[in-house]
Image: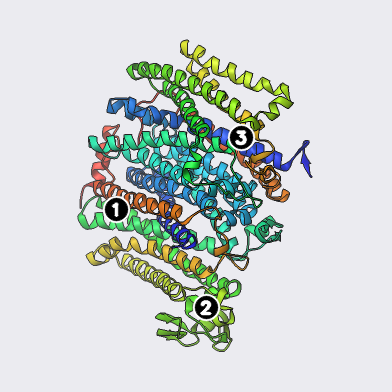
């Protein structure tokens, strides 16, 4: 098989897709986190500030989902078809919450009636919570594996099959992680009383995350043996969980010193490192077949042709820096605290 | 109902609903760029007001367009898994390219466009407006390329058999510039310009009738009328090119569009009619040999008809394809007549003299939307029974693991949610239009206030 700098093309594409979804989790993660806290703000003006904190940038963040989906579709079409059709209902629900999240942000401030704003506040917050949770449920089921036949078709049950204990735990942990991450983002964008209030939220968020992370990890260690093989065989890899530990431990330390910029970098790093662990647990598989091992979907049996992967590596090489450049420019433009008087269109 | 028909209804419904918005975004985007450019050049405040007003409307259409667009990307996987595996190499790469090269640009720049008026220099803001507009144009490029490949596959080869069969790219540029890409892309772009332009004409015609923002609206109306006239005329050529392409590449579709059954005979051109598929007859007003003339510039050359194809390879809904196609053409002709007549009135200095003409423009906003929908329905229903023309049948493209009750559930959810979305869209658009362009613009300087007061003072 052809290689590029010693790695074959499906492996490169595995890294590209992984990198894009890590970027998505970090970027839209704080949007979801901010949304999950939304109903804890009591005053209309606080909610408006919290929304304005993400309003100029969430569109750009959501792009990572669209690109991630496109690269997954193009690079691993077999996996794309199987995963999405197997988890039909969870993905449809994900879409509906994506719709409600988006229109809630857009429509909330277009009217002054309290009931109107309250309705969209609820819609925004519930959607954000459900999106964070569903992303975790999908990840949990990928780690858990599914029954697949020799054509890589899903042969298990419907919606409730996917609400297994491990996936629910991963869902809750994602929500907690994003809430911690989102609270820190909001601290970077707010001041005064609201800022003080979010500091309290952050403490609750950190506790929520650490507890749910420990429970989920313990459950995984006991019940999901297949994920641990790679770590038992290559003990050097234990350095990654250790780095995760350091990264998580850094967040409360930095938060207590009110160094939220750094704390944000470490919650982002935590998200990335957790996904690195997922990548090692799976590689070279994309989806475990639970009953018949040979039916597992791997990056090799799911990959598009090498030619296509090469073309798309070109896309990424040209487009990737451009996307980062746009993002840098937009974040720089809206850097600093939200000021309700100068925003808006 | 079985999974196939439910999945087809769901995809048709979600994509048709989605397609209300992106054409508006592209069309309004074009005029936002025009208004803002004039403002930057002339520093005349009314163009700033116009640019800001249409940006506000744009924000509503763009928002709904984005959230309803992600639905389709996911549906390829959820409902059409076999299709996804079959075309992932090709269709997937076009989608990925759309995300990386187009959607990222427009979505990032959107933040500056909507919230950056006071944060960046005016020329930087204009760059952002351009970026959003160009991003939406590029989006159309990749999406139309992907769809055109389904109509006229090129630059690929088939690997594997049965369940494992799939198309792989052999020649990337041949795939991108497949036989129908360019004709269909230009047709889609112009359709989008028309959707946006006629909405803007409608709103400003309404203001002129009501005597609000009259001076500003007259200027906006004239600029937009030029865009509408050029686009509607140019649409005639792209439409003709498209139809010629269809006659070569998808003869069964062309035969359905004109209700032409005889396997190998000169074909007529209907102005309107009704197709009886069983009797193989069309009742209506026709130009005998007209289709032959359009394609070959004579009245004798035979045109391939539906009967030249095995029954299982013909589109089943011939009358629907015929009607959608003819309605689209009729609307296109009407738009040409209306915009040329308005230009004539302008030349005679009577553009705003007659109320009925302005009222016609008010109601015409819906027509390009309908033409866009009808055109796509004709194109997609005419491609049946294939999802990838000649290669993969729609009935073979489904997700094997999805049950009918799951699709029924999601279809009902989409019906409900999209009904709510449509009502909200109409409500918010109506409200923004009733309120008008001068509601909550910040007046920083007294002089600006005065200037705007002069501009809007009714004549």
Evaluate if marks 2 and 3 touch, with contact meaning CB atoms under 8 Å apart. no
Observer able to see residue B319 = yes
Q: Are marks 2 and 3 on the same chain?
A: no
Specify whether disc 1 shares its chain with disc 2. Answer: yes
Q: Which residue is mark 1?
A: B217
Residue at 32% over, 35% down: A122
| Residue A19, label in figure | 3
Q: How many numbered dots are placed on residues in this image?
A: 3
Closer to us: A98 or B177: A98
User: Answer yes or no: do the residues labelled 1 and 2 have beta carbons within 8 Å?
Assistant: no
User: Label 2, on which residue?
Assistant: B255
The x and y percentages for residue B75 are 50, 52
Apparent side of residue A76 relative to residue A257 in the rendered image (left or right): right
Label 3 chain ID:
A
Q: Callout 2: residue from which chain? A: B
Tell me the element at label 1. helix
Residue B194: quadrant of the picture:
bottom left
User: Which residue is depicted at the point 24% across and 64% down?
Assistant: B353
Q: Position of residue B151 (x, y in %)?
A: 57, 65
Distance (Cα) linking label 1 and label 3? 49 Å
Relative to B38, say whether A189 is above or below.
above
Closer to the camera in the image, A171 or A7:
A171
Decide: is B267 above or below B377.
below
Query: Residue A153 location, x and y as percent?
Result: 60, 51
Q: Reading the chain from its start, which is encountered first: label 1 or label 2?
A: 1
Q: Alpha carbon of mark 1 to alpha carbon of mark 2: how far? A: 45 Å
Label 2: few (<14), some or many (≥20) within 10 Å? many
Tell me the SS state at disc 3. Answer: helix
């Amino acid at each position: 098989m052809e290689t590029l700098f010693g790695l074959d093309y499906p492996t490169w594409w595995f890294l590209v897709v992984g990198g894009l979804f890590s970027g998505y989790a970090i970027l839209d993660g704080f949007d979801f986190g901010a949304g999950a806290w939304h109903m804890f703000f009591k005053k209309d003006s606080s909610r408006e500030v919290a929304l304005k904190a993400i309003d100029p940038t969430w569109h750009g963040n959501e792009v990572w989902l669209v690109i991630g989906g496109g690269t997954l579709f193009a690079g691993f079409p077999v996996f794309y078809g199987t995963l999405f059709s197997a988890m039909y209902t969870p993905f449809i629900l994900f879409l509906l919450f994506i719709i409600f999240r988006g229109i809630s942000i857009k429509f909330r401030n277009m009217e002054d009636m309290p009931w109107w704003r309250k309705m969209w506040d609820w819609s925004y917050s519930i959607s954000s919570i459900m999106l964070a949770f569903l992303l975790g449920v999908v990840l949990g089921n990928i780690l858990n594996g599914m029954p697949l036949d020799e054509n890589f078709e899903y042969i298990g049950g419907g919606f409730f099959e996917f609400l297994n204990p491990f996936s629910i735990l991963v869902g809750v942990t994602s929500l907690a992680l994003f809430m911690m991450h989102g609270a820190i983002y909001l601290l970077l964008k707010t001041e005064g009383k609201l800022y003080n209030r979010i500091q309290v939220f952050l403490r609750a968020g950190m506790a929520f995350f650490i507890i749910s992370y420990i429970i989920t990890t313990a459950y995984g260690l006991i019940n999901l043996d297949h994920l641990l093989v790679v770590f038992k065989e290559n003990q050097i890899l234990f350095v990654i969980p250790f780095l995760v530990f350091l990264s998580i431990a850094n967040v409360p330390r930095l938060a207590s010193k009110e160094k939220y910029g750094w704390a944000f970098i470490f919650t982002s790093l935590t998200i990335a490192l957790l996904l690195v662990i997922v990548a090692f647990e799976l590689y070279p598989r994309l989806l475990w077949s639970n009953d018949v091992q040979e039916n597992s979907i791997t990056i090799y049996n799911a990959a598009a042709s090498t030619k296509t992967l090469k073309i798309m590596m070109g896309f990424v090489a040209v487009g990737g820096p451009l996307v980062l450049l746009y993002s840098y420019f937009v974040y720089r433009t809206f850097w600093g605290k939200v000021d309700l008087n100068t925003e808006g269109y | 109902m079985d999974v196939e028909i439910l999945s087809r209804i769901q995809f048709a419904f979600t994509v048709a609903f989605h397609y209300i918005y992106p054409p508006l975004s592209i069309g309004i985007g074009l005029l936002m760029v025009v208004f803002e450019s004039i403002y930057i050049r002339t520093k005349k405040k009314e163009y700033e007001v116009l640019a800001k007003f249409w940006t506000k409307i744009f924000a509503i259409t763009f928002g709904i367009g984005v959230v309803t667009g992600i639905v389709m990307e996911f549906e390829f996987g959820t409902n059409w898994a076999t299709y996804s595996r079959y075309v992932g190499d090709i269709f997937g790469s076009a989608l990925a390219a759309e995300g990386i090269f187009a959607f990222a640009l427009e979505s990032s720049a959107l933040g500056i466009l909507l919230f950056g008026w006071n944060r960046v220099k005016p020329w930087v803001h204009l760059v952002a407006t351009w970026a959003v507009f160009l991003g939406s144009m590029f989006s159309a490029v990749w999406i139309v390329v992907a769809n055109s490949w389904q109509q006229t596959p090129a630059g690929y080869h088939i690997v594997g058999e049965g369940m494992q069969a799939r198309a792989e790219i052999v020649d990337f540029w041949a795939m991108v510039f497949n036989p129908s890409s360019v004709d269909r892309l230009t047709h889609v772009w112009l359709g989008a310009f028309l959707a946006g332009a006629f909405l803007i004409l409608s709103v400003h015609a309404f203001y002129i009738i009501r005597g609000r923002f009259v001076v500003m609206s007259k200027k906006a109306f004239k600029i937009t009328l030029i865009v509408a006239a050029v686009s509607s005329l140019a649409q005639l050529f792209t439409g003709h090119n498209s139809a010629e392409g269809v006659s070569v590449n998808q003869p069964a579709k062309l035969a359905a569009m004109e209700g032409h059954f005889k396997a190998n005979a000169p074909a007529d051109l209907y102005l309107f009619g009704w197709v009886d598929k069983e009797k193989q007859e069309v009742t209506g007003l026709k130009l005998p040999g007209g289709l032959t003339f359009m394609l070959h510039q004579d009245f004798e050359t035979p045109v391939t008809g539906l009967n030249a194809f095995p029954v299982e390879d013909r589109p089943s809904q011939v009358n629907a394809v015929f009607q959608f196609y003819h309605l689209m053409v009729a609307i296109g002709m009407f738009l040409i007549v209306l915009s040329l007549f308005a230009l004539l009135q302008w030349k005679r200095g009577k553009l705003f003299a007659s109320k009925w003409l302005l009222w016609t423009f008010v109601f015409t906003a819906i027509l390009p939307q309908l033409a866009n929908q009808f055109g796509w329905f004709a194109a997609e229903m005419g491609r049946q029974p294939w999802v990838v023309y000649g290669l993969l049948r729609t009935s073979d493209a489904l997700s094997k693991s999805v049950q009918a009750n799951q699709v029924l559930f999601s279809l009902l959810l989409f019906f409900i949610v999209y009904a709510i979305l449509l009502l909200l869209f109409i409500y918010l658009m109506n409200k923004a239009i009733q309120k008008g362009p001068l509601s909550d613009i910040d007046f920083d300087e007294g002089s600006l206030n005065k200037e705007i007061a002069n501009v809007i003072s009714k004549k």
